[in-house]
Amino acid sequence: MTTTAIRNGTIVTADLTYKADVLIENGRIAAIGPGLTGDTTLDATGCLVMPGGIDPHTHLEMPFMGTYSADDFDSGTRAALAGGTTMVVDFALPVPGQGLLDALKIWDNKTARAHCDYSFHMAVTWWGEQVFSEMADIVDRGITSFKHFMAYKGALMVNDDELFASFSRVGELGGIALVHAENGDVVAELSARLLAEGNTGPEAHAYSRPPQVEGEATNRAIMIADMAGVPLYVVHTSCEDAHEAIRRARQAGKRVWGEPLIQHLVLDDGEYRHPDWDHAARRVMSPPFRDKRHQDSLWAGLAAGSLSCVATDHCAFTTEQKRTGIGDFTKIPNGTGGLQDRMPVLWTEGVGTGRLTPNEFVAVTSTNIAKILGMYPRKGAVLVGSDADLVVWDPHAEKTISAEGQQSAIDYNVFEGRRVKGLPRFVLSRGHVAVTEGVMSSREGHGAFVAREPRGEVNRALSSWKALTAPRPVERAGIPASGV
Ligand SMILES: NC(=O)NCCC(=O)O
Ligand SMILES: [Zn+2]
Ligand SMILES: [Zn+2]
């Protein structure tokens, strides 16, 4: 068995920074310490050795709004690795009426060409006996997180009764509930009104989804999750209204996490006022980009710990696909890319400005989500025995982001022209060197499914607390508990 040594670097994890070499054997970290040697040496002089990024929110080859997102598990996982992300978590989406196991088969079939490891969240897009019972089979297959859309009325959206039933079931099974939190009824109503008033351009997408629709839905999801007794992960938290609800819930001891996207952290709603229709439409996603006040709130949340993970929601559509919505903004496929850029942009705008420490960077790009999703310390760690999913990060390397030469299949990049400082020198996927200073040597089909464990610490603590505080009948002398 050949070995690889990463030498002369500084290890940076979510809680420690120290100088040591790393020895890799059989895809795992075999030793950490001074003076390690291997059959192959990777020189990390001047670099930081960190856990590879984990993007917990991607949509590769997703059927959506009459088309499919353009990046599949080939181009999408290449893009991930190129930017220092060594694992993605995608969403299996049953169409309403379809069984969860059938949907999982379809998603399994998409992954044969994956270059890095992956896992799935399972979406609950309808409710019934079959969904209830197959949720247990899904957990047995190592998928412990269930996504619910409170938006996309008439397509993926579920109502409050379905949310409560599903959240309760996820809690019973020891999983976590995920939500896309926007009030879909209000969005549908506002969209119809805007169209009737002649607001047909991409900017109307943002008008139809003001921060209040997200704040209201986030608060509602938090309260429903609390009543159902399930930990809740709120995806793509984009604004102070939603962040405030999450912050308040966490302060009250509720088990809730929030996930801002790199796009929301650095791109603002001015993009939708761009005179070029294509420019604006390429940035249409839900929730939409917000103003600076909301961006400041998200950055503060990452530093304060009230927001936990930075994702991309990578759901990339070509310009041609976006043009389906000329004349009607509701037909512009919702979604943007970011997989290749998340780590360099977050490092530049976060660590480079002092809004994040390097350790916080590791926490929000990798370790926190590995813990939340039940795969730590196999992933998200630099520890003996962990998978050697590592990034050797050069904090001085620079480039200007451009669609030209990017791994994504789309014809533009929403970060086009942005200068970043901080790039991977090497990226390793279970020990295999997949990237060397921007040159790809990843292997098609190398990526493997990562099964996750249910009933983690947070679930166990929450279940104990809910059992202790559950409603109980009051015993009254001479009155039987059940009527006779
Ligand atoms: N976010 C977005 O606009 N598209 C992908 C689907 C979703 O996450 O809502
Ligand atoms: Zn969403
Ligand atoms: Zn999404």
Image: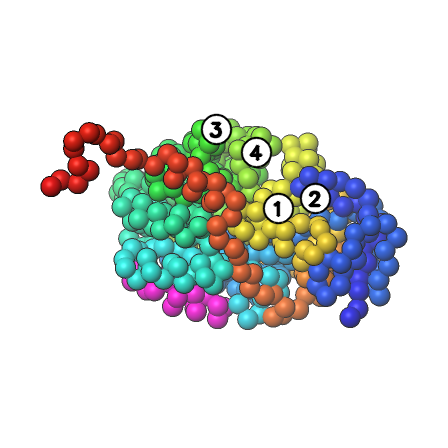
x and y percent of residue 71 in the render?
Answer: 53, 61
Disc 2 target residue: 13
Q: Is residue 130 above or below residue 193?
A: below
Q: Earlier in the sequence, mark 1 or mark 3?
A: 3
Q: Residue at x 72, y 54 (%)?
A: 384
Secondary structure found at label 1: helix
Q: Which residue is nearer to you in this view: 159 or 483?
A: 483
Residue 393 relative to residue 208: left or right: right
Which corner quadrant holds the C terminus?
Answer: top left
Q: Contact, CB < 8 Å: mark 4 with mark 1?
A: no
Disc 1 crowd, CA 10 A, few/some/many (<14, 14-19, 20+): many
Disc 4 target residue: 305
Disc 2 crowd, CA 10 A, few/some/many (<14, 14-19, 20+): many
Q: In 3D space, how far apart are the residues under numbered discs 2 and 4 (Cα atoms)?
A: 16 Å
Which residue ends up furthest to the right in the rendered image? 35
Q: Residue at x 43, y 65 (%)?
A: 104
Disc 1 target residue: 367
Q: Earlier in the sequence, mark 2 or mark 4?
A: 2
Disc 3 target residue: 251
Residue 166 forms part of the magenta stretch:
no
Looking at the rendering, the stretch of residues picked out in magenta corresponds to: 91-110
Q: Residue at x 63, y 55 (%)?
A: 378
